[in-house]
Image (tube, rainbow, N blue to C red):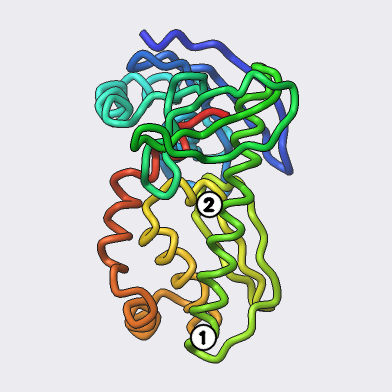
Amino acid sequence: MFGLKKRSGTSGKRPVRGRDIAVAGRRLPLTIREHERATRLTLRIEPGGRALKMSVPVGIADQEIDRFLHRHHGWLKSRLSKLPKASDIEEGGSIPIRGVAHRIARTGKARGITEIQEEDGEPVLWVGGAPEHLGRRIADFLKKQARADLEEAVARHAAAIGKTVAGISMKDTKSRWGSCSSRGNLSFSWRIVMAPEYVIDYLAAHEVAHLQEMNHGPRFWALCGRLCARTDEAKRWLKRHGSALHAIDF
């Protein structure tokens, strides 16, 4: 049916149960957490379609969880089939940078910087180092590009509303693309650099807007629209294509 394989572990005050589920041509880890306030079972697909999470009432039996998964097998298969499968970075493949596909090529040199060059009108990402380090070197390159792009956009948007940014950090978060703390520290997922430039600009504008409006009310979205004219278009792009960026395995 599901090809369930149990995993074990504990986290916090409540036990955490785990299983590996084979569905829609994927084998995914499923984390099951008990919550005191939970009155029903809920199942969530993590961004990128690479993991599943369940919230269940305290003390629920494994048999009830099995029945729940069986009833929702069709829903799960349908949803996962619409998501991109995890893609591995490899020579000859491609990686999107600022929304443009770049062919991946190795320089063949043990050392050397990772850089973009144009060849016959095609953008190519040249990567040095050993083959087994290809993914890591590309990820490092993308992190630097993301920081440069976001620092420029954040500075521009913050100046437009007269706000000061305490700091900027790059992370690889799955649950959100960015965040803003009450102290003015902004955090971004570096994977956003693979999205089109206007989406990167929107994300910077979104978090800067939180420096003034720490909410998602009408005034916040009005401010986002003033800072980034393509706000609505960027939101749609992330909803449709954001999972594909999370699915890339470096």
Q: Nearer the viewer, residue 99 or 208?
A: 99
Indicate the quadrant containing the N terminus: top left, top right, bottom left or bottom right: top left
Which quadrant would the C terminus be assigned to in this image?
Answer: top right
Numbered label tally: 2
Q: Secondary structure at mark 2?
A: loop
Occupied quadrant, residue 31: top right
Q: Residues within 10 Å of mark 2 (few under 14, many from 20)?
A: few
**Which x, y percent locates residue 207?**
51, 70
Q: Is residue 233 above or below residue 205?
A: above
- What is the spatial separation of the Cα atoms under label 2 and label 1, in whole angstroms? 33 Å
Asked if the residues shown at circle 2 and circle 1 are in contact, with their CB atoms under 8 angstroms apart, the answer is no
Query: Where residue 22 sits: x, y (%)?
Result: 42, 13
Q: Position of residue 129 (x, y in %)?
A: 70, 24
> Extreme front residue here?
120
Amino acid type shown at disc 2: Arg
- Residue at mark 2: 37
In this rendering, would 81 be left or right of 209? left
Q: Residues within 10 Å of mark 1 (few under 14, many from 20)?
A: some
**Amino acid marked by disc 1:** Gln
- Nearer the observer, 19 or 128: 128
- Viewer-nearest of discs 2 and 1: 1
The vertical placement of 148 against 22, above or below, is below
State the residue position of label 1. 212
Q: Which mark is residue 116?
A: none
Image-quadrant location for residue 182:
bottom right
